């Protein structure tokens, strides 16, 4: 690359190594507000219940005035685990759970979907086993009164819709909540297992020397010490003499690309970029036959 070099400067660095854990066939994780413990080992869902299959539908007779919304039972399939006895007890006693949460496994670096149910009962529980199955499974049906469906975007915004079947009322919208005013959106804290309601901006969850707030601003994973703010520089195959500079980013945040012909001369700004996704790629023309590029979040 004609002597061009990419240099890493602590927090002022370039591109991404950010991976979440994907648990094989795990579709989602289920939590009964901590009252029923499962076998999940995912770092962000420890002791939740692993779910293999999910089914639900809703509707409304829109052409008939006076009709109310319809919510079906929510059906889940899971393997037998340590939660099974407590789920059985809940089914036969009719216990009401104030809050039940389902997080969908969207894979690494992908927006997470969350469903929150209120006033929940386990309406039925069936167990299935056969000599051909890898392990016994359970089918779990949940009836509920309220539901909130949330999609977390790359910008950490929440696109949500909610419905209360008792009052036949609902709401929807997009928001960026920061309940504890620590500079990190609730959705981002939930995604990475931080504490919503506690100002933990200065804490260092993964012990890598960067605070949780630093990790949010840099677009790195605060739960992984191997997730860094760094970049990759390579030749642009479509434009001879140009280079592609990529780095992990936070959508909506502004970054400054700087260049120096050597490490003695001060860096000068060559471009200011506002990120639109979790990875940003810029095509740049070589500023010299040899030199150093640097990317940093705009202060």
Image (tube, rainbow, N blue to C red):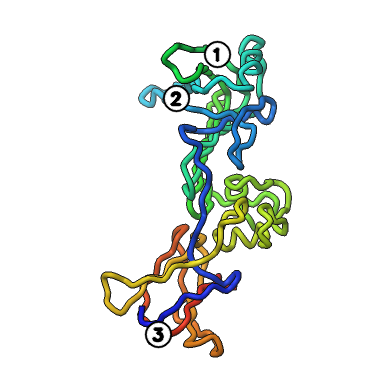
Quadrant location of the N terminus in the rendered image: bottom left
How far from the left and from the top, in percent, is residue 108? Answer: 48, 47
Mark 3 and mark 2 lie on one chain; the one further toward the N terminus is 2
Tag in front: 1 or 2: 1
User: Residue at 59% across / 17% down in the picture?
Assistant: 122
Q: Position of residue 221 (x, y in %)?
A: 57, 54
- Position of 136 relative to 45 (above/below): above
What separation in Å lies between label 1 and label 3 (alpha carbons)? 66 Å
Which mark is in front, 3 or 2? Answer: 3
Res. 148 in view: no
Residue bearing mark 3: 287
Nearest-to-viewer mark from 1 and 3: 3
Identify the residue position indicated by label 2 in the image: 55
Secondary element at tag 3: loop
The residues tagged by marks 3 and 2 sit, at their Cα atoms, a distance apart of: 55 Å
**Other residues around mark 2 within 10 Å, as few (<14) / some (14–19) / many (≥20):** few
Which residue occupies the extreme bottom position in the image? 265
Q: Earlier in the sequence, mark 1 or mark 2?
A: 2
In this image, 213 relative to 21: left or right?
right
Residue 125's tag is 1
Which of the pair 201/265 is nearer the observer? Answer: 265
Residue 7's x, y, as percent? Answer: 51, 75
Question: Is residue 130 among the parts visible in the rendering?
Answer: yes
């Amino acid at each position: 690359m004609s002597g061009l070099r990419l240099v890493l400067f602590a927090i002022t660095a370039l591109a991404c190594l950010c991976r979440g854990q994907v648990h094989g066939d795990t579709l989602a994780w289920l939590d009964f507000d901590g009252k029923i413990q499962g076998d999940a080992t995912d770092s962000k869902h420890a002791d939740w219940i692993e779910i293999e299959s999910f089914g639900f539908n809703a509707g409304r007779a829109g052409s008939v005035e006076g009709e109310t919304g319809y919510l079906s039972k929510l059906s889940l399939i899971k393997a037998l685990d340590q939660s099974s006895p407590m789920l059985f007890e809940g089914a036969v006693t009719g216990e009401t759970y104030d809050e039940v949460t389902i997080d969908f496994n969207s894979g690494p670096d992908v927006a997470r979907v969350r469903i929150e149910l209120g006033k929940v009962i386990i309406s039925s529980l069936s167990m299935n086993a056969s000599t051909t199955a890898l392990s016994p499974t359970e089918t779990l049906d949940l009836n509920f009164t309220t539901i909130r469906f949330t999609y977390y975007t790359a910008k950490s915004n929440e696109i949500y819709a909610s419905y209360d079947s008792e009052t036949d009322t609902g709401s929807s919208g997009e928001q960026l909540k920061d309940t504890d005013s620590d500079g990190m959106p609730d959705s981002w804290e939930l995604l990475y297992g931080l504490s919503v309601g506690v100002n933990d901006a200065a804490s260092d969850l993964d012990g890598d020397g960067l605070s949780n707030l630093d990790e949010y601003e840099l677009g790195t994973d605060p739960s992984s010490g191997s997730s860094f703010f760094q970049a990759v520089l390579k030749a642009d195959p479509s434009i001879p003499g140009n280079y592609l500079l990529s780095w992990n980013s936070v959508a909506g945040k502004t970054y400054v690309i700087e260049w120096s012909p050597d490490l003695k001369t001060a860096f000068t700004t060559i471009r200011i970029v506002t990120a639109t996704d979790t990875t940003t790629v810029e095509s740049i023309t070589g500023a010299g036959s040899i030199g150093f590029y640097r990317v940093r979040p705009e202060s």
